[in-house]
Image (spheres, rainbow, N blue to C red):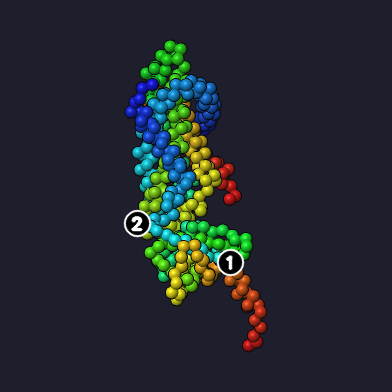
Amino acid sequence: MVSAFVAAIRVTGHRSINAVWRTGMATRFFFLTLMYSGNSFRRFHLIVKELFSTGVLSLIIIVVAGLFVGMVLGLQGYETLRRYGSESALGSMVALSLVRELGPVVAALLFASRAGSAMTAEIGLMRATEQISAMEMMAVNPIARIVAPRFWAGVISMPLLAALFSAVGVFGGYFVGVIQIGVDEGSFWSQMQAAVDFRDDILNGVIKSFVFGTVVTIIALFEGYDAPPTAEGVSGATTRTVVTSSLAILMLDFVLTAIMFRGN
Amino acid sequence: MERTTLDLWVGIFVVAGVAALAMLAMKVGNLGTYNMSETYQVHAYFTNVGGLKPKASIKSAGVLVGRVTDISLDTQRYEADVVMSLDKRYQFPKDTFADILTSGLLGEQYIGLVPGGDSEMLKNGEQIKMTQSAVVLENLISKFIFNKASEPVNPK
Protein backbone atom coordinates (compact mmCIF):
# COMPACT_ATOMS: atom_id res chain seq x y z
CA MET A 1 0.00 0.00 0.00
CA VAL A 2 2.69 2.43 1.05
CA SER A 3 5.05 1.17 -1.61
CA ALA A 4 2.38 1.76 -4.29
CA PHE A 5 2.04 5.33 -3.04
CA VAL A 6 5.78 5.82 -3.14
CA ALA A 7 5.88 4.33 -6.63
CA ALA A 8 3.23 6.79 -7.82
CA ILE A 9 5.21 9.73 -6.44
CA ARG A 10 8.37 8.34 -7.98
CA VAL A 11 6.74 8.01 -11.42
CA THR A 12 5.34 11.55 -11.25
CA GLY A 13 8.70 12.92 -10.20
CA HIS A 14 10.49 11.00 -12.90
CA ARG A 15 8.10 12.28 -15.57
CA SER A 16 8.37 15.89 -14.40
CA ILE A 17 12.15 15.80 -14.29
CA ASN A 18 12.17 14.14 -17.69
CA ALA A 19 9.91 16.85 -19.13
CA VAL A 20 12.16 19.61 -17.79
CA TRP A 21 15.19 17.78 -19.12
CA ARG A 22 13.68 17.46 -22.58
CA THR A 23 12.62 21.11 -22.59
CA GLY A 24 16.22 22.06 -21.89
CA MET A 25 17.46 19.77 -24.63
CA ALA A 26 14.94 21.16 -27.08
CA THR A 27 16.05 24.71 -26.27
CA ARG A 28 19.68 23.80 -26.78
CA PHE A 29 18.70 22.08 -30.02
CA PHE A 30 16.90 25.25 -31.11
CA PHE A 31 19.99 27.40 -30.52
CA LEU A 32 22.23 24.86 -32.24
CA THR A 33 19.91 24.98 -35.25
CA LEU A 34 20.08 28.78 -35.32
CA MET A 35 23.86 28.63 -34.97
CA TYR A 36 24.33 26.27 -37.91
CA SER A 37 21.73 28.01 -40.10
CA GLY A 38 24.28 30.13 -41.92
CA ASN A 39 25.32 27.27 -44.15
CA SER A 40 21.83 26.39 -45.22
CA PHE A 41 21.27 29.89 -46.53
CA ARG A 42 24.42 29.60 -48.60
CA ARG A 43 23.01 26.36 -50.02
CA PHE A 44 19.54 27.63 -50.57
CA HIS A 45 18.46 24.74 -52.80
CA LEU A 46 18.30 22.61 -49.66
CA ILE A 47 15.68 24.95 -48.23
CA VAL A 48 13.82 25.02 -51.54
CA LYS A 49 13.65 21.23 -51.54
CA GLU A 50 12.20 21.26 -48.05
CA LEU A 51 9.82 24.11 -48.94
CA PHE A 52 8.37 21.74 -51.49
CA SER A 53 7.64 18.99 -48.99
CA THR A 54 6.46 21.22 -46.15
CA GLY A 55 4.82 24.05 -48.06
CA VAL A 56 3.69 22.91 -51.48
CA LEU A 57 2.44 19.53 -50.34
CA SER A 58 0.43 21.19 -47.54
CA LEU A 59 -1.24 23.55 -50.01
CA ILE A 60 -4.23 21.38 -50.81
CA ILE A 61 -5.22 20.60 -47.24
CA ILE A 62 -4.78 24.25 -46.26
CA VAL A 63 -6.85 25.59 -49.16
CA VAL A 64 -9.67 23.06 -48.77
CA ALA A 65 -9.78 23.46 -44.99
CA GLY A 66 -9.73 27.26 -45.32
CA LEU A 67 -12.57 27.21 -47.81
CA PHE A 68 -14.76 25.08 -45.58
CA VAL A 69 -13.93 26.97 -42.41
CA GLY A 70 -14.84 30.20 -44.19
CA MET A 71 -18.09 28.73 -45.45
CA VAL A 72 -19.03 27.49 -41.98
CA LEU A 73 -18.21 30.93 -40.55
CA GLY A 74 -20.46 32.49 -43.18
CA LEU A 75 -23.36 30.22 -42.29
CA GLN A 76 -22.98 30.35 -38.52
CA GLY A 77 -22.23 34.07 -38.50
CA TYR A 78 -25.30 34.77 -40.58
CA GLU A 79 -27.54 32.72 -38.30
CA THR A 80 -26.27 34.57 -35.24
CA LEU A 81 -26.10 38.06 -36.70
CA ARG A 82 -29.59 37.76 -38.16
CA ARG A 83 -31.04 37.74 -34.65
CA TYR A 84 -29.71 41.26 -34.16
CA GLY A 85 -30.62 42.41 -37.63
CA SER A 86 -26.98 43.07 -38.48
CA GLU A 87 -26.30 40.63 -41.29
CA SER A 88 -24.30 43.36 -42.95
CA ALA A 89 -21.58 42.83 -40.34
CA LEU A 90 -21.03 39.30 -41.67
CA GLY A 91 -18.01 40.33 -43.71
CA SER A 92 -16.19 41.89 -40.82
CA MET A 93 -17.02 38.94 -38.57
CA VAL A 94 -15.72 36.37 -41.03
CA ALA A 95 -12.59 38.36 -41.87
CA LEU A 96 -11.70 39.27 -38.30
CA SER A 97 -12.11 35.76 -36.93
CA LEU A 98 -10.08 34.33 -39.79
CA VAL A 99 -7.28 36.87 -39.83
CA ARG A 100 -6.87 37.13 -36.09
CA GLU A 101 -7.50 33.61 -34.86
CA LEU A 102 -8.59 30.82 -37.12
CA GLY A 103 -6.15 31.45 -39.95
CA PRO A 104 -2.96 31.22 -37.91
CA VAL A 105 -4.23 28.61 -35.42
CA VAL A 106 -6.01 26.15 -37.69
CA ALA A 107 -3.33 26.43 -40.36
CA ALA A 108 -0.69 25.73 -37.71
CA LEU A 109 -2.62 22.73 -36.37
CA LEU A 110 -2.95 21.33 -39.88
CA PHE A 111 0.68 22.09 -40.55
CA ALA A 112 1.72 20.25 -37.38
CA SER A 113 -0.19 17.13 -38.34
CA ARG A 114 0.59 17.28 -42.05
CA ALA A 115 4.19 18.47 -42.23
CA GLY A 116 5.40 18.21 -38.63
CA SER A 117 4.65 14.51 -38.28
CA ALA A 118 6.32 13.79 -41.63
CA MET A 119 9.44 15.67 -40.53
CA THR A 120 9.63 13.74 -37.28
CA ALA A 121 9.18 10.38 -38.99
CA GLU A 122 11.75 11.21 -41.64
CA ILE A 123 14.46 12.32 -39.22
CA GLY A 124 13.60 9.56 -36.76
CA LEU A 125 14.07 6.99 -39.51
CA MET A 126 17.33 8.63 -40.55
CA ARG A 127 18.48 8.18 -36.99
CA ALA A 128 17.17 4.57 -36.86
CA THR A 129 18.88 3.62 -40.13
CA GLU A 130 22.09 5.28 -38.90
CA GLN A 131 22.22 7.84 -41.69
CA ILE A 132 22.83 10.54 -39.12
CA SER A 133 25.72 8.61 -37.58
CA ALA A 134 27.11 8.10 -41.07
CA MET A 135 27.04 11.84 -41.65
CA GLU A 136 28.84 12.49 -38.40
CA MET A 137 31.45 9.93 -39.48
CA MET A 138 32.00 11.94 -42.66
CA ALA A 139 32.39 15.11 -40.61
CA VAL A 140 29.13 16.51 -41.99
CA ASN A 141 27.20 18.29 -39.30
CA PRO A 142 23.73 16.70 -39.36
CA ILE A 143 22.14 19.75 -37.75
CA ALA A 144 23.51 22.02 -40.47
CA ARG A 145 22.76 19.59 -43.29
CA ILE A 146 19.40 18.06 -42.26
CA VAL A 147 17.81 20.10 -39.49
CA ALA A 148 18.48 23.73 -40.39
CA PRO A 149 17.01 23.64 -43.94
CA ARG A 150 13.87 21.97 -42.67
CA PHE A 151 13.60 24.49 -39.86
CA TRP A 152 13.79 27.47 -42.19
CA ALA A 153 11.43 25.87 -44.67
CA GLY A 154 8.87 25.49 -41.88
CA VAL A 155 9.39 29.03 -40.64
CA ILE A 156 9.01 30.47 -44.15
CA SER A 157 6.03 28.42 -45.25
CA MET A 158 3.88 28.77 -42.12
CA PRO A 159 2.96 32.49 -42.53
CA LEU A 160 2.34 31.95 -46.24
CA LEU A 161 0.05 29.00 -45.54
CA ALA A 162 -1.82 30.92 -42.85
CA ALA A 163 -2.31 33.87 -45.20
CA LEU A 164 -3.62 31.53 -47.88
CA PHE A 165 -5.94 29.93 -45.37
CA SER A 166 -7.39 33.30 -44.34
CA ALA A 167 -7.71 34.56 -47.91
CA VAL A 168 -9.46 31.41 -49.11
CA GLY A 169 -11.63 31.46 -45.98
CA VAL A 170 -12.77 35.01 -46.71
CA PHE A 171 -13.86 33.85 -50.15
CA GLY A 172 -15.64 30.87 -48.60
CA GLY A 173 -17.54 33.23 -46.33
CA TYR A 174 -18.24 35.49 -49.29
CA PHE A 175 -19.55 32.54 -51.30
CA VAL A 176 -21.98 31.42 -48.62
CA GLY A 177 -22.90 34.85 -47.27
CA VAL A 178 -23.24 36.90 -50.45
CA ILE A 179 -23.82 34.46 -53.27
CA GLN A 180 -25.95 31.88 -51.51
CA ILE A 181 -27.73 33.72 -48.70
CA GLY A 182 -27.78 37.12 -50.35
CA VAL A 183 -26.14 39.50 -47.89
CA ASP A 184 -25.46 42.81 -49.63
CA GLU A 185 -22.11 42.55 -51.37
CA GLY A 186 -21.14 46.16 -50.79
CA SER A 187 -21.78 46.08 -47.07
CA PHE A 188 -20.01 42.72 -46.84
CA TRP A 189 -16.77 44.15 -48.23
CA SER A 190 -17.08 47.70 -46.91
CA GLN A 191 -17.76 46.63 -43.34
CA MET A 192 -14.90 44.17 -43.64
CA GLN A 193 -12.53 46.88 -44.83
CA ALA A 194 -13.72 49.23 -42.14
CA ALA A 195 -13.19 46.63 -39.43
CA VAL A 196 -9.92 44.99 -40.44
CA ASP A 197 -6.84 47.04 -39.72
CA PHE A 198 -3.62 46.16 -41.51
CA ARG A 199 -1.28 46.59 -38.56
CA ASP A 200 -3.53 45.52 -35.72
CA ASP A 201 -5.14 42.52 -37.34
CA ILE A 202 -3.27 41.27 -40.39
CA LEU A 203 0.25 41.92 -39.19
CA ASN A 204 -0.50 40.45 -35.78
CA GLY A 205 -1.90 37.37 -37.50
CA VAL A 206 1.31 37.06 -39.51
CA ILE A 207 3.39 37.39 -36.34
CA LYS A 208 1.29 34.68 -34.72
CA SER A 209 1.75 32.26 -37.59
CA PHE A 210 5.47 33.02 -37.66
CA VAL A 211 5.74 32.08 -33.96
CA PHE A 212 3.63 28.97 -34.48
CA GLY A 213 5.75 27.95 -37.46
CA THR A 214 8.94 28.26 -35.43
CA VAL A 215 7.55 26.30 -32.49
CA VAL A 216 5.92 23.51 -34.51
CA THR A 217 8.97 22.99 -36.70
CA ILE A 218 11.43 22.95 -33.83
CA ILE A 219 9.25 20.49 -31.87
CA ALA A 220 8.93 18.21 -34.89
CA LEU A 221 12.65 18.31 -35.63
CA PHE A 222 13.66 17.79 -32.03
CA GLU A 223 11.32 14.82 -31.55
CA GLY A 224 12.67 13.24 -34.71
CA TYR A 225 16.29 13.92 -33.85
CA ASP A 226 15.81 12.60 -30.34
CA ALA A 227 13.66 9.57 -31.22
CA PRO A 228 14.81 6.17 -29.98
CA PRO A 229 16.12 4.33 -33.05
CA THR A 230 13.39 1.72 -33.12
CA ALA A 231 10.10 1.38 -34.98
CA GLU A 232 8.24 1.97 -31.72
CA GLY A 233 10.43 4.93 -30.86
CA VAL A 234 9.76 6.66 -34.18
CA SER A 235 6.01 6.12 -33.98
CA GLY A 236 5.99 7.41 -30.40
CA ALA A 237 7.98 10.47 -31.44
CA THR A 238 5.54 11.19 -34.28
CA THR A 239 2.60 11.05 -31.90
CA ARG A 240 4.39 13.29 -29.42
CA THR A 241 5.09 15.81 -32.16
CA VAL A 242 1.43 16.18 -33.02
CA VAL A 243 0.24 16.28 -29.41
CA THR A 244 2.95 18.60 -28.09
CA SER A 245 2.84 21.02 -30.97
CA SER A 246 -0.96 21.22 -30.96
CA LEU A 247 -0.95 22.03 -27.26
CA ALA A 248 1.90 24.49 -27.72
CA ILE A 249 0.00 26.25 -30.51
CA LEU A 250 -3.15 26.65 -28.44
CA MET A 251 -1.32 27.83 -25.33
CA LEU A 252 0.90 30.24 -27.23
CA ASP A 253 -2.15 31.52 -29.06
CA PHE A 254 -3.68 32.53 -25.75
CA VAL A 255 -0.51 34.26 -24.63
CA LEU A 256 -0.03 36.07 -27.94
CA THR A 257 -3.67 37.12 -28.11
CA ALA A 258 -3.49 38.47 -24.57
CA ILE A 259 -0.43 40.53 -25.54
CA MET A 260 -1.71 41.72 -28.91
CA PHE A 261 -5.38 42.42 -28.43
CA ARG A 262 -5.42 43.54 -24.84
CA GLY A 263 -7.92 46.22 -24.08
CA ASN A 264 -8.94 47.27 -27.56
CA MET B 1 22.06 26.40 -61.66
CA GLU B 2 19.65 24.09 -63.39
CA ARG B 3 15.91 24.57 -63.25
CA THR B 4 13.74 21.87 -61.85
CA THR B 5 9.98 21.41 -61.62
CA LEU B 6 10.47 21.51 -57.88
CA ASP B 7 11.62 25.11 -58.13
CA LEU B 8 8.53 25.90 -60.17
CA TRP B 9 6.24 24.45 -57.52
CA VAL B 10 7.99 26.25 -54.70
CA GLY B 11 7.79 29.43 -56.76
CA ILE B 12 4.06 28.94 -57.24
CA PHE B 13 3.67 28.34 -53.51
CA VAL B 14 5.57 31.46 -52.52
CA VAL B 15 3.78 33.62 -55.09
CA ALA B 16 0.39 32.29 -53.97
CA GLY B 17 1.24 32.99 -50.34
CA VAL B 18 2.41 36.52 -51.03
CA ALA B 19 -0.62 37.14 -53.23
CA ALA B 20 -2.87 35.96 -50.42
CA LEU B 21 -1.13 38.38 -48.06
CA ALA B 22 -1.54 41.21 -50.53
CA MET B 23 -5.18 40.34 -51.00
CA LEU B 24 -5.69 40.33 -47.26
CA ALA B 25 -3.91 43.66 -46.98
CA MET B 26 -6.04 45.36 -49.58
CA LYS B 27 -9.11 43.24 -48.93
CA VAL B 28 -10.05 42.84 -52.59
CA GLY B 29 -13.04 45.14 -52.23
CA ASN B 30 -11.08 48.03 -53.71
CA LEU B 31 -11.25 46.03 -56.89
CA GLY B 32 -13.83 48.23 -58.58
CA THR B 33 -15.96 50.08 -56.05
CA TYR B 34 -18.85 48.37 -57.69
CA ASN B 35 -19.18 46.93 -61.13
CA MET B 36 -21.58 49.63 -62.10
CA SER B 37 -20.96 50.25 -65.74
CA GLU B 38 -21.22 54.02 -65.96
CA THR B 39 -21.51 56.35 -63.01
CA TYR B 40 -21.90 60.03 -62.40
CA GLN B 41 -20.97 61.88 -59.24
CA VAL B 42 -23.12 64.14 -57.16
CA HIS B 43 -22.46 65.49 -53.72
CA ALA B 44 -24.47 66.60 -50.75
CA TYR B 45 -23.85 68.32 -47.43
CA PHE B 46 -25.10 66.75 -44.23
CA THR B 47 -24.91 68.30 -40.77
CA ASN B 48 -24.26 64.84 -39.35
CA VAL B 49 -23.51 61.64 -41.24
CA GLY B 50 -23.66 59.42 -38.16
CA GLY B 51 -22.15 56.03 -38.94
CA LEU B 52 -22.17 56.40 -42.72
CA LYS B 53 -19.06 54.93 -44.32
CA PRO B 54 -17.53 55.10 -47.78
CA LYS B 55 -18.98 52.37 -50.02
CA ALA B 56 -22.29 52.50 -48.19
CA SER B 57 -25.17 51.86 -50.52
CA ILE B 58 -27.45 54.51 -51.98
CA LYS B 59 -31.00 53.40 -52.51
CA SER B 60 -34.06 54.86 -54.06
CA ALA B 61 -37.35 53.12 -53.42
CA GLY B 62 -35.25 50.34 -51.93
CA VAL B 63 -33.30 49.75 -55.13
CA LEU B 64 -29.53 50.04 -55.08
CA VAL B 65 -28.63 52.95 -57.37
CA GLY B 66 -25.10 53.85 -56.28
CA ARG B 67 -22.38 53.95 -53.65
CA VAL B 68 -20.90 56.57 -51.36
CA THR B 69 -17.38 57.23 -52.65
CA ASP B 70 -16.02 59.78 -50.24
CA ILE B 71 -16.90 61.53 -47.00
CA SER B 72 -15.00 64.58 -45.82
CA LEU B 73 -15.52 67.56 -43.57
CA ASP B 74 -15.98 70.86 -45.37
CA THR B 75 -14.28 73.42 -43.13
CA GLN B 76 -16.10 76.31 -44.83
CA ARG B 77 -19.47 75.20 -43.61
CA TYR B 78 -18.44 72.62 -40.98
CA GLU B 79 -20.65 70.08 -42.57
CA ALA B 80 -19.92 66.65 -43.96
CA ASP B 81 -19.41 66.59 -47.71
CA VAL B 82 -20.57 63.25 -49.07
CA VAL B 83 -19.65 62.31 -52.63
CA MET B 84 -21.89 59.71 -54.22
CA SER B 85 -21.50 57.92 -57.49
CA LEU B 86 -24.79 56.98 -59.05
CA ASP B 87 -25.51 54.60 -61.85
CA LYS B 88 -25.94 56.41 -65.19
CA ARG B 89 -29.10 54.45 -65.85
CA TYR B 90 -30.84 56.23 -63.00
CA GLN B 91 -31.37 59.96 -63.41
CA PHE B 92 -32.74 62.03 -60.56
CA PRO B 93 -34.51 65.42 -60.59
CA LYS B 94 -32.68 68.47 -59.25
CA ASP B 95 -34.85 68.71 -56.16
CA THR B 96 -34.14 65.18 -55.01
CA PHE B 97 -34.12 64.68 -51.26
CA ALA B 98 -31.22 62.72 -49.66
CA ASP B 99 -31.78 61.08 -46.26
CA ILE B 100 -29.37 59.09 -44.16
CA LEU B 101 -31.30 56.03 -43.08
CA THR B 102 -30.53 52.90 -41.12
CA SER B 103 -31.24 49.41 -42.33
CA GLY B 104 -32.70 47.49 -39.43
CA LEU B 105 -32.54 48.60 -35.84
CA LEU B 106 -28.77 48.40 -35.47
CA GLY B 107 -27.87 47.85 -39.08
CA GLU B 108 -25.56 49.93 -41.18
CA GLN B 109 -26.48 53.29 -42.57
CA TYR B 110 -27.26 54.12 -46.16
CA ILE B 111 -28.51 57.06 -48.15
CA GLY B 112 -32.08 57.05 -49.39
CA LEU B 113 -32.97 59.24 -52.36
CA VAL B 114 -36.51 60.58 -52.69
CA PRO B 115 -37.00 62.20 -56.09
CA GLY B 116 -38.79 65.54 -56.34
CA GLY B 117 -40.79 66.98 -59.18
CA ASP B 118 -38.24 69.11 -61.03
CA SER B 119 -38.06 68.54 -64.77
CA GLU B 120 -34.31 69.15 -64.85
CA MET B 121 -32.06 66.23 -63.91
CA LEU B 122 -28.97 66.18 -61.69
CA LYS B 123 -25.76 66.29 -63.69
CA ASN B 124 -22.25 65.12 -62.92
CA GLY B 125 -20.67 67.19 -60.13
CA GLU B 126 -23.87 68.85 -59.02
CA GLN B 127 -25.12 69.11 -55.50
CA ILE B 128 -28.20 67.72 -53.80
CA LYS B 129 -29.57 70.70 -51.85
CA MET B 130 -32.06 69.04 -49.58
CA THR B 131 -30.65 66.61 -47.11
CA GLN B 132 -31.60 65.09 -43.82
CA SER B 133 -28.91 64.02 -41.38
CA ALA B 134 -28.54 60.74 -39.62
CA VAL B 135 -30.70 60.19 -36.60
CA VAL B 136 -28.46 60.09 -33.57
CA LEU B 137 -30.04 57.97 -30.90
CA GLU B 138 -28.61 60.00 -28.00
CA ASN B 139 -30.07 63.24 -29.32
CA LEU B 140 -33.41 61.57 -29.78
CA ILE B 141 -33.42 60.26 -26.25
CA SER B 142 -32.28 63.54 -24.72
CA LYS B 143 -34.97 65.42 -26.64
CA PHE B 144 -37.54 63.00 -25.35
CA ILE B 145 -36.31 63.34 -21.77
CA PHE B 146 -36.23 67.14 -21.86
CA ASN B 147 -39.71 67.25 -23.33
CA LYS B 148 -40.93 65.03 -20.55
CA ALA B 149 -39.21 67.15 -17.93
CA SER B 150 -40.72 70.38 -19.24
CA GLU B 151 -44.23 68.97 -19.10
CA PRO B 152 -46.21 70.09 -16.07
CA VAL B 153 -46.90 67.39 -13.59
CA ASN B 154 -50.53 66.74 -14.26
CA PRO B 155 -52.67 66.36 -11.18
CA LYS B 156 -55.16 63.56 -11.25
Residue depicted at 45% across the width and 75% down the height: B118
- Which dot marks residue B47? 1
- B28 in relation to B109, above or below: above
The amino acid at mark 2 is Gln
Q: Is residue B65 left or right of residue B51?
A: left
Q: Is residue A240 left or right of residue B46?
A: left
Residue topped by disc 2: A180
Quadrant of the image occupied by residue A241: top left
Distance between the Cα atoms at labels 1 and 2? 38 Å
Q: Is residue A12 left or right of residue A237?
A: right
Q: Residue furthest bottom?
A: B156
- A173 in relation to A123, above or below: below
Q: Chain of mark 2?
A: A
How packed is label 1: few (under 14 Cα within 10 Å), some, or many (20 or more)?
some
Residue B87 position in % (x across, y down): 41, 62
Q: How many dots with numbers?
A: 2
Q: Secondary structure at mark 1?
A: loop
Does residue A138 appear in this view? Answer: yes
Q: Chain of mark 1?
A: B
Residue A236 vs residue B98, the one in the foreground: B98
Residue A71 vs residue B100, the one in the foreground: B100
Residue depicted at 53% across the width and 30% down the height: A16
Residue A27 position in % (x across, y down): 54, 27
Residue A126 position in % (x across, y down): 39, 21
Q: Secondary structure at mark 2?
A: helix
The amino acid at mark 1 is Thr
Q: Are marks 1 and 2 in contact (CB under 8 Å)?
A: no
Does residue A76 appear in this view? Answer: no
Residue depicted at 65% across the width and 87% down the height: B155
Q: Residue furthest left?
A: B5
